Image (spheres, rainbow, N blue to C red):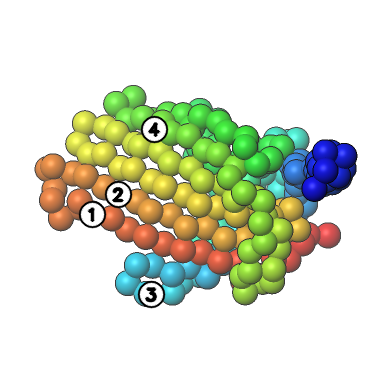
């Protein structure tokens, strides 16, 4: 191949690369009263259970009141991060919008007991299709890990979550929890769970 031909091939390749679609980014979903997610969860022993979340009230622009499957009400933020006791400092931010591959952030969570704390990190690692009982969706895969410590035990969690704009939240989640308790060896061990979206019902 002569020099001009080589330059033509290089130019063609470069031209194609500039035409490649940009990596999409997802803004916060528009949550609505009545939005409901139902999940099937499989534990390490193979036992299957179900859990759900339903939005029942939007007290403010960044507050979401959710009914859990057991009927209890809980507070979330507008990214559907759980807010224990409604206190932002207790929040674990497993999602931060806009979601885009490569985005990363630090997890830092406080507790009512000042001797307990949790720190970690999260990152959007992929934009990919995921198939669950509710269907197939394009999702942002977020991987996160955090370590909780206090005077008696240490607990490390690893999450993989697929956030899907079409269902306003996650369609799949896996969690690995490792506990080390030198005072109670029976409580030391590793637990795995996996949840998949069975049905998403949008509010009206």
Q: Classify 7 as above or below 158.
A: above
> What residue do we see at 65% from left, 41% from top?
101
Q: Which of marks 3 and 2 is nearer the N terminus?
A: 3
Q: Viewed as shown, does residue 15 lie left or right of 199? A: right
Q: Quadrant of the C terminus?
A: bottom right
Q: Do the residues labelled 2 and 1 touch (CB within 8 Å)?
A: yes
- The residue where tag 2 is placed is 178
Give the residue furthest to the front. Answer: 2
Between 181 and 99, the one lying in front of the other is 99
Secondary-structure class at tag 4? strand
Q: Separation of disc 2 and disc 4 at Cα?
A: 14 Å
Q: Dot 2: within a 10 Å radius of its alpha carbon, few (fewer than 14), some, or many (20 or more) residues?
A: some
> What residue do we see at 66% from left, 56% from top?
128
Q: Classify 69 as above or below 104.
A: below
> What residue do we see at 18% from left, 44% from top?
181
Between 112 and 132, the one lying in front of the other is 132
- The residue where tag 4 is placed is 118
Q: Classify 106 as above or below 67.
A: above
Q: Dot 3: within a 10 Å radius of its alpha carbon, few (fewer than 14), some, or many (20 or more) residues?
A: few
Q: Which of marks 1 and 3 is in front?
A: 1
- The residue where tag 3 is placed is 47
Q: Classify 118 as above or below 181.
A: above
Q: Is residue 147 visible?
A: yes
Q: Earlier in the sequence, mark 2 or mark 4?
A: 4
- The residue where tag 1 is placed is 189
Q: In the drawing, what numbered circle is on residue 174?
A: none
């Amino acid at each position: 191949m002569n020099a001009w031909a080589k330059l033509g091939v290089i130019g063609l390749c470069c031209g194609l690369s500039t035409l490649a679609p940009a990596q999409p980014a997802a803004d916060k979903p528009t949550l609505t009263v009545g939005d409901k997610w139902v999940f099937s969860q499989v534990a390490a022993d193979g036992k299957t259970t179900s859990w759900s979340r339903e939005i029942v009230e939007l007290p403010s622009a960044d507050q979401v009141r959710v009914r859990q499957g057991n009927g209890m009400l809980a507070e979330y933020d507008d990214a559907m991060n759980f807010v224990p006791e409604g206190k932002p400092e207790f929040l674990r931010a497993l999602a931060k919008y806009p979601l885009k591959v490569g985005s990363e952030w630090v997890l830092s969570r406080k507790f009512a007991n000042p001797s307990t704390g949790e720190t970690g990190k999260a990152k959007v690692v992929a934009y990919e299709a995921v198939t669950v009982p509710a269907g197939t969706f394009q999702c942002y895969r977020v991987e996160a890990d955090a370590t909780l410590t206090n005077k008696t035990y240490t607990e490390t969690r690893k999450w993989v979550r697929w956030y899907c704009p079409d269902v306003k939240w996650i369609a799949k989640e896996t969690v690995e929890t490792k506990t080390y308790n030198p005072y109670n060896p029976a409580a030391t061990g590793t637990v795995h769970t996996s949840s998949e979206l069975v049905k998403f019902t949008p509010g009206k």
